Image: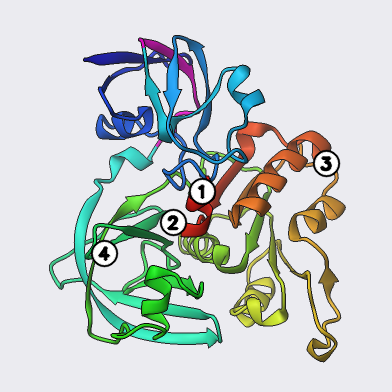
Amino acid sequence: MSYQVTLKTSGKQFRVDQDETILDAALRQGITLPYGCKNGACGSCKGKVIEGAVEHGQHSDAALNKADETSGAILFCCAYPQSDLMIEAREVQGAGDIAIRKVPCRVNTITKPSSDVAILKLQLPATERFQFLAGQYLEFLLKDGQRRAYSIANAPDQEGPLELHIRHLPGGLFTDFVFGAKDPALKEKDILRFEGPLGSFFLREDSKKPIIFVAAGTGFAPIKSIIEQMQHKKIVRPIHLYWGGRRPSDLYLHELCQAWAKSIPNFIYTPVISDALPEDQWKGRTGFVHQAVMADHPNMAEHQVYACGAPVMVNAARQDFSSQCHLPEEEFFADSFTSAADIAAK
């Protein structure tokens, strides 16, 4: 049993097999719909059913609540067709041109710019040419069949290893391994396997609009990749980067951002700290990072926004920027960093 899905805007059609999600079927057939976590936690793949019916698998109420479902909204990553469908979705151009593959790698270096962030650099085989779009992510394939997703932090055209930024979540299956909280610990020269590239979070180069980047914690990683790729390709657009953390130490590459502000034309960097302690002696912006954006940009009608971080930040930015700051919904691009805890809470 399979069902036919038609995209309302483009008229493209594809088949969805039994027990297959709309997103998986689309990706399998070279059609890229917006997506992030692929497990119903982030809401990046939200669209709408125009005709037909679907059944949802497990998902977060924050990503799709009952009112959303009543209005016809669906999450492509966990929606199973019950009939032929016509759906309303933003088709993503460009990502489908790069094959998703399983790749072995060797841990080149592990450095810790702060107590709870590790920067992993992964060396690929000499004969391997791994293509990706700046902003995309990969998934480590763990021995027990589980996966863990991390954004690539370097630009695609940079020579050398792949760079990942990993925050330690105590009790986390992979992060405890990286930070040595479990034995054996990850060490340099270890062999890992991953699948990628994945995700629809990347720069839309056909636009000339000013860009607002909003990062929280290690959500900075894919934004770093995009900014460095813009430098490489000499893409000149006004950029305002906001990077939020609880403490100043969360902004683990603060000096790099300051250097960008000095060297990149029309580039503004605004760090925002929510829970500074007296000993931090923080004299910069305070509060929630997306609220700092709104204070500086009350009208985002002519902007694009790229937001990356925890789902609570991304979802608040998505809603508030649209409802209060006139940002067109189609100009908000996001990657939510969902953890195992986010998935378990669905």
Q: In percent of the image, x 62 and y 41: which residue is there?
A: 62
Q: Which mark is residue 203?
A: 1
Q: Secondary structure at mark 4?
A: loop
C-alpha separation, residue under disc 3 versus residue under disc 4: 45 Å
> Between 90 and 53, which is closer to the camera in this rendering?
53
Q: Secondary structure at mark 1?
A: loop
- Label 2–label 1 contact, CB within 8 A: yes
Q: Which mark is residue 299?
A: 3
Q: Nearer the viewer, mark 4 or mark 2?
A: 4
Q: Which mark is residue 134?
A: 2
Query: Whole-percent x and y of residue 263?
Result: 64, 74
Question: Would you say 277 lies left or right of 89 here?
Answer: right
Query: Whole-percent x and y of residue 298?
Result: 85, 45
The residue carrying mark 4 is 142
Q: Amino acid at mark 4?
A: Leu
Identify the magenta region: 83-93
C-alpha separation, residue under disc 2 versus residue under disc 3: 27 Å
C-alpha separation, residue under disc 2 versus residue under disc 1: 7 Å
Please determine whether, in this image, residue 337 is positioned above or below residue 299.
Answer: below
> Between 161 and 206, which is closer to the camera in this rendering?
161
State which tag comes first along the sequence, 4 or 1.
Answer: 4
